[in-house]
Amino acid sequence: MSCLVSSTCSLVPFDSTLTRPTRFNKLGSSISWQSSFPRLSIEIGSVISSPIVKKESFVQSAWTRRSRGEAAKKPNKKSWKQRTDMYMRPFLLNVFFSRKFIHAKVMHRPTSKVISVATTNARDIRTNIPSLVDNEACILIGKLIAERSKEADVYAVSYEPRKGERIEGKLGLVIDTIKEHGIIFVP
């Protein structure tokens, strides 16, 4: 027996000929207000006091790139490390090497604010050193980043190398100089 549950929780008989237009039913739209409720079929098990309710219709989920079955299996959720890493290591060193200059900055990861910046492209540095990209420039950038970070009360930073990047050469010089001037690197 098909039934609908009304707002007063009493069972109302459901007439499928009035609400569903078919080829044989000439009614183009639903006549009854009952068609706005989802259809439920009720089976009474061995215990009469607790009926088993099976829902025949389902609520469609919002549009996603994944299918409904896939969305139900696994929600799109970051891992614990991905969610807490920015708070455990809040200050991140970012070093960029160009053919013409070197740029380094320390950022606060949760707020994306820049704490300290040093670049060989700045006017005061550009006029004082002979080359903007050699080893002396790397050492100078490391020293400036360390001093400016200490002024902002940042004494520990972390560095995440990019994929396939090694900490050697000019990058190694910048990081070693920062370490020598009292900044701790958090792994």
Image: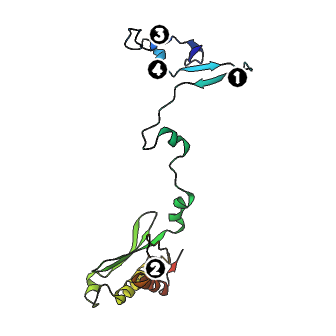
Give the residue at x 52% y 55%: 78
Disc number lying in front (3 or 4): 3
Q: Viewer-proximal residue, 78 or 8?
A: 78
Which residue is under mark 1?
A: 50
The type of residue carrying mark 3 is Thr
Query: Residue 185 location in percent, x, y?
Result: 51, 78
Q: Amino acid at mark 2?
A: Ile
Residue at image point 49% right, 15% down: 34
Q: Residue at left 44%, top 38%?
A: 62
**Kind of residue at badge 1:** Ser
Total numbered circles = 4
Q: CA distance from mark 1 to mark 3?
A: 30 Å
Q: CA distance from mark 1 to mark 2?
A: 67 Å
Q: Is residue 50 above or below residue 12?
A: below
- What secondary structure is marked by label 2? loop
- The residue that label 3 is drawn on is 17
Q: Which residue is mark 2?
A: 167
Asked if the residue under mark 4 is in contact with the one under mark 1, i.e. CB atoms within 8 Å, the reply is: no
